[in-house]
Amino acid sequence: MLRQRRVTGEDPLRKSGGYNADRSNSVLAFLCWAGTGAAPVLVVCNMTPVPRHGYRIGVPRPGAWREIFNSGSGFYGGTNLGNEGRVRATAVSFHGRGQSLELVLPPPATIFLRPDGE
């Protein structure tokens, strides 16, 4: 069941770090947190029929990030392209963050990633 929720500056459910300026590749990405201290979830949408290999996005935490959802999975009728379950952040600054992920974005699909172990 969907619930509507009024979002204010004090609301613990917040979105931040949108990278939706990539109009030329039709990719939308943003970070979500469920509350203070919660692990972020990175949501990346490739809205084209073209796979994106080596697509870099800055993230707030180092280490491994686990792919927790991939709508491009064969389970959903997709191409089975993805990040083989996890990808490690590298010390390459991007989007104003000290580390980044180099991702495979399946065509047209959405993936969710979060820091591994959280």
Image (tube, grey):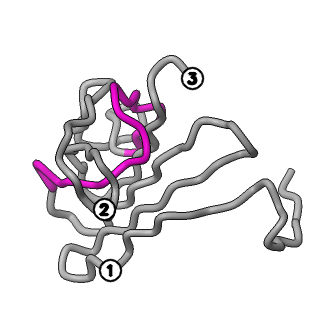
Q: Is residue 3 above or below residue 83?
A: below
Residue type for callout 1: Ala
Q: Is residue 38 magenta?
A: no
Q: Which residue is mark 1?
A: 21
- Residue placed at 22% from the left, 53% from the top? 93
Q: For marks 1 and 2, give the CA distance.
A: 13 Å
* 62 relative position to 39: left or right: left
Say whether marks 2 and 3 touch (CB < 8 Å).
no
* Residue sitting at x 88%, y 59%: 3
Work out how far the residue at label 3 is from the one at label 1, CA to CA, in angstroms: 29 Å
Residue at x-position 34% and y-position 55%: 97
Q: Amino acid at mark 3?
A: Glu
Give the residue at mark 2: 46
Which of disc 1 and disc 3 is earlier in sequence?
Answer: 1
State the SS at label 1. Answer: loop
Would you identify the image quadrant in which residue 11 lies?
Answer: bottom right
Comparing 98 with 66, the one in front is 98
Look at the picture and state if 12 lies above or below 4: above
Give the side of residue 109 with respect to residue 10, left or right. left
Q: Horizontal and vertical percent for residue 114?
A: 48, 35
Disc 1 versus disc 2: nearer the observer: 1
Secondary element at tag 3: loop
* Rendering quarter of residue 8: bottom right
Circles 1 and 2 in contact, beta carbons < 8 Å: no
Q: Main secondary structure of the magenta part?
A: strand
Quadrant occupied by the C terminus: top right
What is the span of residues highlighted in magenta in the rendered image? 52-71
